Amino acid sequence: MKISALGDQAIIVTFGEEIKRDIYEKVQRLFQALQQHPFAGMIECVPSFTSLAVYYNVYEVWKGNERSERSHDYVRQYIKELCDSYKEEVKQDVKHISIPVCYGGEYGPDLEEVAHYHGLQVEDVIRIHSETTYFVYMLGFTPGFPYLGGLSKELETPRKKTPRLQISPGSVGIGGNQTGIYPLETPGGWNIIGRTPISLFNPEEETPTFIQSGMYLRFIPITKEEYVSLEGAKKWM
């Protein structure tokens, strides 16, 4: 475990350098511990693949600090002691979801390119991509964008040399050893192989993001006709 400054009002706790489940569990364990036992002045915690960023109000930390230490030193020591003393298991509901995807054509303009890169048929790419169960490690980049672990090495594809300025909401892409879904219209450099008609982000909902970290996810191939009939749906199956 490595604790480093992240500006003057945050620290970052790093547990490793690889995308691995045991590292993810350590991140989530500290996240859970801080939710249950926050220190005075803590604002929020933001988990990622391998680390947890902890943001705090410097003045509030100093004011509630009985040791009269610098805020950064106090938070660092607090986290070390919490990691040593916290013994509870990570509490996270296991949820499996299915995401319908129309692969190729106007919805997946890079599908043939990905197939050609690997010397595969288009049907093989669809089969390999959709037969895997993925784990949602984190959300990032844009609201609701899920970073998924579990992509087959057969489909690992370099990001595009020239990113697109506009990618449609729901687009399913492959970038390096990851696959994910663009919930909003944004620029992006991943290879787009399909699109889901399901709405993944709605700021007006009580839970704005349809997909959450810790979920298991599978892609279900659908036809263009099925895509049109489902377009804009908030959930499926």
Image (spheres, grey):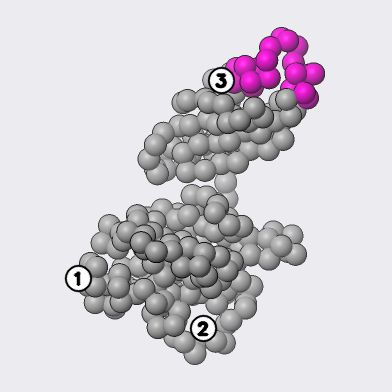
Q: How far is disc 1 from disc 2 in space, using C-alphas?
A: 28 Å
Of pointers 1 and 2, the one earlier in the residue sequence? 1
Q: How far is disc 1 from disc 3 in space, using C-alphas?
A: 49 Å
Magenta stretch bounds: 59-78
Q: How far is disc 3 from disc 2 in space, using C-alphas?
A: 50 Å
Q: Quadrant of residue 52 in the image?
A: top right
In the rendered structure, which amino acid carries the disc numbered 2?
Tyr
Q: Residue furthest bottom?
A: 225
Q: State yes or no: residue 231 in magenta.
A: no
Task: Look at the numbered disc 3 and give the secondary structure of its residue.
Answer: helix
- 46 or 192, nearer to the observer: 192
In the rendered structure, which amino acid carries the disc numbered 3?
Lys
Q: Position of residue 78 (x, y in %)?
A: 63, 20
Q: Could you tell whether 15 is left or right of 233 in the image? A: left
Decide: few, some or many residues near mark 2? Use Cα within 10 Å; few <14, some 14-19, many ≥20. Answer: some
In the rendered structure, which amino acid carries the disc numbered 1?
Gly
Q: Position of residue 235 (x, y in %)?
A: 61, 72
Decide: few, some or many residues near mark 1? Use Cα within 10 Å; few <14, some 14-19, many ≥20. Answer: few
Figure check: 68 above or below 157: above
Residue at x 57%, y 82% (from the top left corner) = 230
